[in-house]
Image (cartoon, rainbow, N blue to C red):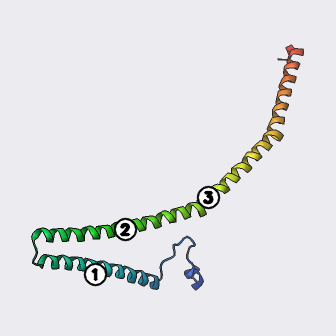
Amino acid sequence: MTVEHQTTPAETSEQPSSALPESTPTERSADNRRAAGIIAIVVVVVLLIVGGIVLLALAPESTTAKVRDIFIIVMALESLVLGVAVIVLIVQVATLINLLQNEIKPILDSTNETVNHLRGTTQFLSNNLVEPVLKLNEYLAGLRKLFDFIRPDRR
C-alpha cells in the first residue's frame, strides 16, 4: 500500500522568503499613466517646435532672417534642455550627499568603533595571554638547556 502525500492549501500558498515582491496592478497602471503623461508632454513640445519652424519658414522675410530666427529658437530649446539636465544633476548630487551623510557615515563610524574594540581586545589578549605563555616557554627552554648542560649523557 502506498501513501501519497497530498498538499494542503497552506503548503501551496507558502512562498519562499527570498522571492522578490512583485508590483501590484495599481502600481503598474500608475507607472503606465506617468509614462504616458511624459510621452504626451514631449510630443506636444516637439509639435510646437515644428509648428514654430514651419510658421517662420512660411513668413515672407529674407532667407537670412529665417535662418537666424530658426537658429535662435534652436538655441533657446537647447538652453532649456541644458537647464533641465543641470537641475537633474543638482538633485542627483543632493541625493548622493544625503546618502553619504545619513547611511555611509554611520556605517563607517560603526566600523571604526568595531576596529577600536578589536584593537583593545587584541592588546588585552597580548598582555594577558600571549606574553605569559611566551615567558613560560622561554623559562622552560632555559630549564631544558640547563638540564641538558647538567646531564649531557641523557641524549
Examine the rendered structure and indicate whether residue 133 appears above or below residue 58.
above
Residue type, mark 3 in image: Lys
Mark 1 sits on what residue? 44
Residue at the farthest right position? 150
Residue 13 versus residue 96: which sits nearer the camera? 96
Specify which label sits upstream in the sequence, 2 or 1.
Answer: 1
Which amino acid, mark 1?
Val
Residue 73 x, y percent position in the rendering: 24, 71
Calculate the distance from the C-alpha at mark 1 to the C-alpha at mark 3.
Answer: 45 Å
| Residue 127 locus on image (x, y percent) | 81, 39
Between 45 and 38, the one nearer to me in the picture: 45
User: Image height check: is 3 above or below 98?
Assistant: below
Residue 48 lies, with reference to residue 145, above or below; the image says below
Which is more foreground, mark 1 or mark 3? Answer: 1
Mark 2 vs mark 1: in front: 2
Asked if residue 4 can be seen in this view, the reply is: no
Q: Which corner quadrant of the image does residue 32 belong to? A: bottom left
Q: Which residue is mark 2?
A: 83
Residue 88 makes an appearance in the image: yes
Determine the CA span between mark 2 and mark 1: 19 Å
> Residues under labels 2 and 3: Cα distance?
32 Å
CA neighbours of label 3 inside 10 A, class few (<14), some (14 to 19), many (20+):
few
Quadrant location of the C terminus in the rendered image: top right
| Image-based side of 88 in relation to 5, left or right | left
Q: Which mark is residue 105?
A: 3
